[in-house]
Image (spheres, rainbow, N blue to C red):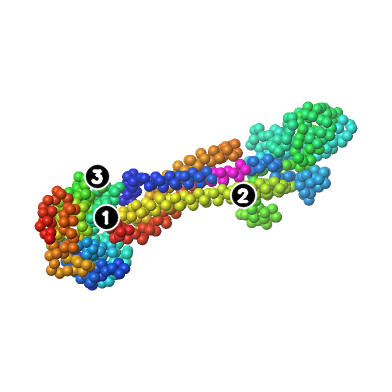
Amino acid sequence: MANAISVETRHVGKSFGSVKALDDIDLRIGSGEFVALMGASGSGKTTLMNILSCLDTASSGEVWLDGVNAATLDEEGRREFRARHIGLVFQQFHLIPYLNALENVMLAQHYHSVTDETSARAALDKVGLGHRLDHLPSQLSGGEQQRVCIARAIVNQPPIIFADEPTGNLDEENENRVLEIFEKLHAQGHTIVMVTHNPLLGNRAGRIIHLQYGRIVEGVSVVAATKEIPVRAIARQVPASNASTMAMIESVAP
Amino acid sequence: MIFRMLRQSWLRNPRRKILAMTTVFLAASLLSALMLVSIDIGDQMAREMKSYGANILMLPAEQAALPSLGDGEDNPLAGQSSLDESELPNIMDIFWRNNITGFAPLLNGEIKLDGNHAVKIIGTFFDKRLTVPDEDDYHTGQKIISPFWHIQGEWPDDEKDEILAGSALARAQGWQAGRELTVDGMPVRITGILTSGAEEEDMLIVPLRLAQRWLDKPGKIQAVRVSALTVPENDLSKRALRDPDALDAETYDLWYCTAYVTSIAHQLEEAVSGSIARPIWQVAASEGAIIEKIQSLLIMATCAALLAAAMGVASLMTSALMERSREIGLMKALGAHYWQISLLFYAEAILGSLAGGMLGCLAGWGLARVIGWQLFNAPLKFSWIVTPCVLLLSVFIAMLGTWFPARRIARLYPAEVLHGRA
């Protein structure tokens, strides 16, 4: 089971110059929850995720992570918190190109404490890549790279995992595999916060938090939350092989 | 893990590192060659400068008040005091004996030629074989210490009754090489006509043993010209020149064990009893000044090479960091300390600089040999001290070149670089 970490924000705001990216964000995420942060492009979901994962700081308000007010942490404090309590999964995978799958996973251990090849192998086994340990990122498919990224995120057993559009670059098959891994992790007690603008992915989370123009919107449907996105444009980006996703998008398109 | 990362980074992403290594290699080659030249140029130039003639004149102590040779009426050879020829081998027994390139005794006087007119003579060594400590076949004399002497004909043999005639005297007397003269009832042959640009042109230059016989001064000499390889003078040598006894023990040892013209002169005085040794400052000072200026020039060129290499490495490292900003952002996002990331980049740079530095040392040695042959017709000596110095400088170049871009690592914001906004 995961630690009793919870995420709570109080009146969090973030401005870039005169532009307000986030405005008065109040949210609570319980320990062991699987939450999807949804919204259109520019709604502030990635900005919020950066603040929650200690990659960025809020301009105002408080961010409580596992009882710690992250707003009071300096850069070193945030670094330490990230290394110990947070697993990160990125849309673009961000694997070190000259390290193989196993070494990429061990990198997270190295910055956390000490490297342990056995547990790194176990993490890769967990995401179904036990047979691809020695492969470089360039020798792996997109889905496999994302699974290495997930293995790297979970290898230190962080209580909370933040995933930013984790399936944004994947086909349907790999999208499903990644989501299944998240669901398993959730079942094991990890708190997962996933940023997505894909309604199908959002629906697989236990709870959806909608963002619109930098604010949390209550009682908005999945489709409404993403209504600013030209749905057909999304459909064009979905791989042709992902027929069911395309059909669903077509069905909700205005 | 850091070693694993370094190994994989070098093996799988070598392009920029090889470029940086090449930059360091070129700089190290230049540095190594310049340092080898700087170290050996003192000796090489000093040897070249020996064409200016001897730089130390030894006289009997009684004549200490008299100025140096060749000053007309104040000529010390005009005095009656003398030194013992038998003590000459002691010159090659001083601490700096290996820096003594040669010496030649002098005995001055006047003889009656063919019973008619008086002629000035100077007795000396031409190319005399001498028994000295630790040398089996040691030769010394004017041939070695006066390379500027131009002989029309041949050098005389010290063991035969052969002499040189000064060009002015030969012209006045109508003598040519090969002419036989009779001195004191003894036939001698002129083997060559000497042009030196000095007072010897009005004299007969004869083997010392003949001069001693004709002047009836067996075993005596009046002066010794010594040619020694020296280092440029500095404040210490000047202080020692004023009064060596005023130096404290440590400073005295430092001065004594440095090849200053003053310390060599001091040791010569200790070696030959009743003598005083004087630097011929016109020669010694100009040698020192020229060598010092050349060394300064080389140091400046070395510094310029260092700076250029550091800028080259900095430029390469900056572009490498830009290229790898996402990698750095990721490391930061995963919780890497600033020093852990910097360590990786510094270690990469240092490894490259050591490899480049080692290769540069070898190439620099080759370059120095070429320079030696081109400038001095002799290879420059390889000094092992250059290798650690060049390696240290190579590492310094790499660290300096990495220091500027490494500061950018601290400013990289993971959230921005990971989303491609920086």
Q: Say which chain tag 3 marks.
A: A
**Residue B42 forms part of the magenta stretch:** yes
User: Residue lying farthest front?
Assistant: A254
Q: Chain of mark 1?
A: A
Q: Which mark is residue B14?
A: none
Mark 2 lies on a secondary structure that is: helix
Of the residues shown, which amino acid type is indicated by label 1?
Ala
Q: Secondary structure at mark 1?
A: helix
**Disc 2 target residue:** B292
Between the residue at mark 2 and the residue at mark 1, the CA separation in whole angstroms equals 57 Å
Q: Quadrant of the C terminus of chain B?
A: bottom left
* Badge 3 or badge 1: first in the primary sequence: 1
Q: Is residue B79 left or right of residue B40?
A: right
Please name the residue shown 71% across and 45% down the image. B56
Q: Secondary structure at mark 3?
A: helix
Which residues are the magenta region? Answer: B35-45
Residue farthest toward the right in the current orientation of the protein? B116
Frontmost of labels 3 and 1 is 3
Q: Is residue B274 visible?
A: no
* Amino acid type shown at disc 2: Glu
Q: Which mark is residue A139?
A: 3
Task: Please state which of residues B372 and B77 is positioned toward the viewer in this rendering.
Answer: B372
Inter-mark Cα distance, 3 to 1: 21 Å
- Horizontal side of B383 relative to A167 (left or right) equals right
Please report the residue visible at 19 percent of the width from the left and 53 percent of the height from the top. A237
Tell me where residue B229 sits by quadrant: top right
